[in-house]
Amino acid sequence: MKEALVMLKFTPKRSAPILASLIASAAANAENNFKQDADKLFISKLVVNEGQTLKRGLPVSRGRWHPILKRSSRITVELSPLEAKPDKKKSKKAAKAEKAETDSTEKKVPKVKKAKAAKKVVEAVETPAAEVAAESEKSES
């Protein structure tokens, strides 16, 4: 957030000081109302929408008038606290360590072999039952 305020300070646009004061106000509100640390905030969302339009006119000859539309905008700023991001190198090492722990505790059984074994068991169970049913039908007739 501090970097954004510095960037806006040196931006030569008419809206830069307005946005800077709005962001500073949002940070002060977060610090005062929600007990957040201003140094650990970042701008998560900044939206500029169309606001009210004031319709004014400029009288001209022959009783006519030219419309003047004074447009405004609504700016919404959302600040969020920075979360501590672990280093990528540490996270990869931690992931490998977790994977090694889970692999050592669990037995390695491929799922494909389990599925084939289950099919063979089902086929073995169905075959005798089918033969018994066929034999009972023959004996009844």
Image (spheres, helix red, strand yellow):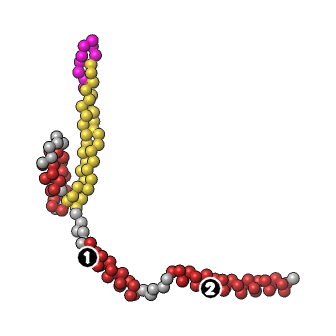
Quadrant housing residue 30: bottom left
Residue 27 on image: x %, y % = 17, 55
Identify the residue at image location x=24%, y=31%: 70
Residue at image position (23%, 68%) is: 84
Residue type indicated by callout 2: Val
Callout 1 amino acid: Lys
* Numbered range of the magenta stretch: 56-64
What quarter of the picture does the N terminus occupy?
bottom left
Residue 40 spot, x, y in % from top left:
18, 62
Look at the picture and state if 63 lies above or below 100.
above
Which residue shows up at 64% across the image and 83% down it?
A: 122
Residue 109 in sight: yes
Q: Is residue 111 magenta?
A: no
Q: Is residue 61 covered in magenta? A: yes
Helix, strand or loop under label 1: helix
Q: Is residue 116 above or below residue 5?
A: below
Query: Where residue 11 appears, x then y in whole percent?
Result: 15, 46
Q: Which comes before the other along the chain, label 2 or label 1?
A: 1
| Residue 21 visible in this rendered orientation of the protein | no
Q: Nearer the viewer, residue 9 or 141?
A: 9
Mark 2, Cα crowd under 10 Å, few <14 / some 14-19 / many 20+, is few
Viewer-side label of 2, 1: 1
- Residue placed at 76% from the left, 83% from the top? 133
Relative to 95, 116 lies left or right: right
Secondary structure beneath dot 2 equals: helix
Q: Which mark is residue 90?
A: 1
Disc 2: which residue: 121
User: 54 or 123: which is nearer to us?
Assistant: 123
